[in-house]
Image: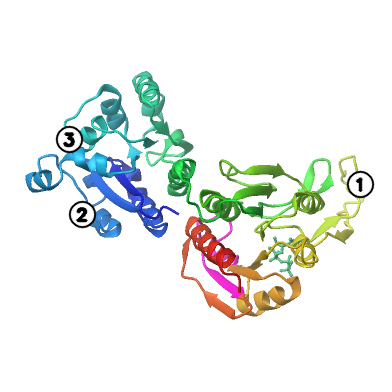
């Protein structure tokens, strides 16, 4: 949803520079234009050729590239952009931005800026927490720059803590959000869309539960993309590894029954998308006391009862109450097409996105997905793409469906 938007992407040196390549891909997929600038140290990690080829615009590297300077000076470069993004931003570049240094093309562009700047820092945890970096951070924030991340995790150097570059999807979501705030012509403006996401948890006793390994990443990416296209999002989520996207209405639930109730309370809506991994059964009696080991050495047996099928119940609503488009997911571990086709028929949804969640696929908890898309015409396989790209592709399809329903 970035059609026609020009993003000046400054890539500075650091092990995370390769992630800027994924960011370029996401921006391009969303229809945006990218002009990369690489600092000299960034060139140690990614080549200008890679960044330029993916961006479709030659990557700029040197302030004293005189030919380029005469064609389009660094001032024009900034004037021409709609937004500036620095990802990854090293401690050194943060210091330059904070103090107005302008000794290369990237820092000159920042000093000459008249556009919003999103900064995604990435550095060693000690460098991040060092007093000078924190002082510089305060200065750039006071200057109006927007900071995304860093996140905590294991660093390339083996240390652990804050300093890792935010995921490309997160930086991308911040870019979408920026344009969303200022955009008037969004394809899903005025549409209300329900998205379920994450994993339900069914208590066995007060300290144990039955659940699954859903990370919530796909539901979150879809909700972020729909929101960036202007939709009002009702996000009903169970447990997830990632926080809900910005700007959506969040209902946090625990069990499948809670999710069922929250979904039916949220209706009516224009579109409903069921990404959540819902537990099909729950223990019949979740006692209020912890189940204790028995003296006879035998494991307890647990009686299960069926949970309501939320997707099916919404797909079966009468016209008028039923969303115009009901979209399900199918998590399969084998015979994906056969099982997903049967599920599509059984659930009564309009579209179904099937994915292979077998251990070898890496889908559960991972960042990419291979989708087989079912509608009443048949099915088609989408190539492997990131979960953010799945969100974009689905958003485009929903927008064109709502414009011209079959
Ligand atoms: N779903 C739901 N409510 C349930 C179970 C599933 O809304 N109680 C939705 C999921 O959100 C997903 C779709 O139904 O959109 C399919 O979920 P999946 O777990 O793949 O299928 P199941 O219905 O659980 O069937 P099976 O266990 O036989 O694969």
Q: Secondary structure beneath disc 1? A: loop
Dividing the image into four quarters, tell me where ligand 1 lies: bottom right
On the image, the x and y values in percent for residue 289 come to 89, 39
Residue 139 disc label? none
Residue shown at 19% from the left, 29% from the top: 102
Q: Which residues are magenta?
A: 356-374
In this rendering, position of residue 257 left or right of residue 251: right
Of marks 3 and 1, which one's residue comes earlier in the chain?
Answer: 3
Compared to residue 230, the image places residue 373 above or below, namely: below
Cα distance between the residues tagged 3 and 2: 17 Å
Q: Nearer the viewer, mark 1 or mark 2?
A: 2
Residue shown at 56% from the left, 65% from the top: 403
On the image, the x and y values in percent for residue 154 come to 46, 40
| Residue marked by disc 3 | 104
In this rendering, position of residue 292 left or right of residue 152: right
| Residue marked by disc 2 | 58
Marks 3 & 2, CB-CB < 8 Å contact: no
How crowded pointer 2 is (Cα within 10 Å; few <14, some 14-19, many 20+) is rated as some
On the image, the x and y values in percent for residue 29 come to 40, 59
Cα distance between the residues tagged 1 and 2: 73 Å
Q: Secondary structure beneath disc 3? A: loop
Q: Quadrant of residue 92?
A: top left
| Residue marked by disc 1 | 295
Q: Secondary structure beneath disc 2? A: loop
Compared to residue 215, the image places residue 76 above or below, namely: above
How crowded pointer 3 is (Cα within 10 Å; few <14, some 14-19, many 20+) is rated as some
Q: Nearer the viewer, residue 195 or 356?
A: 195
Residue shown at 38% from the left, 42% from the top: 156
Of marks 3 and 2, which one's residue comes earlier in the chain?
Answer: 2
Q: Is residue 373 magenta?
A: yes
Q: Nearer the viewer, residue 215 or 406?
A: 406
């Amino acid at each position: 949803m970035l059609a026609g938007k020009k993003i000046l992407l400054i890539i500075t040196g650091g092990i995370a520079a390769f992630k800027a390549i994924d960011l370029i891909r996401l921006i391009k997929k969303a229809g945006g234009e990218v002009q990369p600038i690489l600092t000299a140290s960034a060139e140690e990690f990614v080549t200008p050729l890679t960044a330029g080829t993916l961006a479709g615009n030659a990557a700029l590297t040197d302030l004293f590239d005189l030919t380029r300077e005469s064609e389009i000076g660094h001032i024009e470069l900034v004037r021409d952009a709609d937004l500036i993004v620095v990802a990854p931003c090293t401690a050194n570049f943060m210091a330059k931005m904070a103090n107005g240094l302008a000794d290369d093309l990237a820092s000159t562009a920042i000093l000459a800026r008249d556009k919003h700047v999103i900064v995604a820092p990435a550095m060693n945890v000690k460098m991040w927490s060092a007093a000078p970096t924190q002082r510089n951070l305060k200065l750039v924030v006071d200057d109006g720059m927007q900071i995304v991340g860093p996140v905590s995790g294991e660093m390339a150097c083996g240390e652990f803590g804050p300093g890792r570059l935010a995921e490309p999807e997160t930086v991308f979501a911040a870019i979408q959000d920026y344009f969303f705030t200022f955009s008037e012509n969004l394809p899903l403006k005025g549409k209300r869309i329900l998205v379920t996401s994450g994993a339900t948890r069914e208590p066995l006793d007060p300290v144990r539960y039955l659940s699954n390994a859903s990370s919530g990443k796909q539901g979150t990416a879809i909700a972020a993309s729909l929101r960036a296209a202007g939709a009002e999002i009702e996000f009903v989520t169970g447990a997830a590894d990632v926080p809900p996207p910005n700007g959506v209405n969040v209902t946090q639930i625990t069990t499948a029954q809670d999710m069922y109730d929250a979904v039916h309370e949220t209706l009516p809506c224009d579109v409903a998308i069921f990404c959540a991994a819902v537990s099909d059964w729950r223990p019949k009696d979740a006692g209020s006391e912890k189940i204790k080991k028995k003296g006879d050495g035998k494991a307890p047996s647990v009686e299960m009862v069926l949970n309501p099928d939320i997707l099916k119940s919404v797909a079966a609503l009468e016209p008028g109450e039923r969303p115009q488009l009901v979209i399900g997911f199918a998590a399969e571990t084998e015979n994906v097409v056969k099982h997903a086709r049967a599920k599509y028929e059984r659930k009564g949804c309009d579209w179904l996105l099937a994915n292979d969640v077998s251990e070898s696929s890496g889908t559960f908890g991972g960042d990419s997905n291979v989708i087989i898309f079912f509608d009443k015409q048949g099915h088609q396989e989408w190539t492997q793409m990131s979960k953010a790209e799945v969100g974009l592709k689905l958003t485009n399809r929903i927008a064109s469906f709502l414009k011209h329903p079959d």
